[in-house]
Image (tube, grey):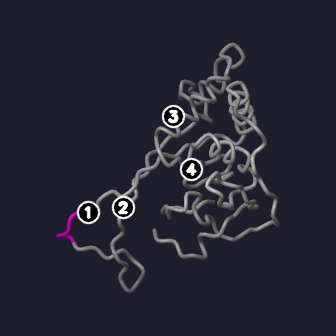
Amino acid sequence: MIRSPDDMKPEHRQTRVLHPSGRQIAVDAGLAPLLAALWSEGIETANSCEEEEPGVIWIEFETASGLSRFLKIVARSLDPRDEGRGGLRDRMTRMSPARGFWRYTTNVYADRPPLDGEGLMASDPDSPPPAARRTTVSLRFPVTDYQRVYQLFMEARRSSGGAEEEGVEEEGEERGEGQGSEDESGLGGEEGER
């Protein structure tokens, strides 16, 4: 499905976060502290949404190694004795049969064929499919895990000598009717930040 620019407006309250590159990036206010901490660790994201679907946070990482680093940082502060069966570790690793486990997907972005006059993808059945230009990985996890994940991430950073409060700047409430906005990386991902 092709989205129009009107569909790409953010649905949640936005705030600006200072990226280490010096750019101010608009993100969902509910994820701003975690995104700022990720970026300060050199973990790049492409898109995110504080509630992409009811009760589910979405973060799209630029690389699988970025997602892996994030998971390792969180797991490093996680005490297995405190979590038990059905706890955060189980949800992160899908070891729990209960609902609320974390979901991981790979996203492959390709060159898009031109649109026909009706806004549909025009394709030549004899031409090969477009080559992949960019691959990212997405993480979706329960909103109810956010505070614990943020706490664990910051604890691990502090213990390694990293964490200071990040450059999150509250700027008015920007809302749109659709979902998505400019992506966090500036690389123009297919699904804008939500």
Q: What residue type is labelled 2?
A: Ala
Residue carrying label 2: 110
**Label 1 vs label 2: CA separation?**
9 Å
| Mark 4 nearby-residue class (10 Å; few <14, some 14–19, many ≥20) | many
Q: Which mark is residue 129?
A: 1
Within-10-Å neighbours for mark 1: few <14, some 14–19, many 20+: few
Residue labelled with disc 4? 45
Q: Mark 3 points at which residue?
A: 68
Earlier along the polypeptide chain: callout 3 or callout 4?
A: 4
The vertical placement of 114 against 140, above or below, is below
Nearest to N terminus: mark 4 or mark 1: 4
* Spatial CA span between label 3 and label 2: 24 Å
Contact (Cβ within 8 Å) of mark 1 with mark 2: yes
Tell me which segment is drawn in magenta.
125-129
Q: Please say whether residue 133 is one of the residues in the magenta stretch.
A: no
Q: Is mark 2 on a helix, strand or loop?
A: strand
Instruction: Give the mark nearest the N terminus, 1 or 2.
Output: 2
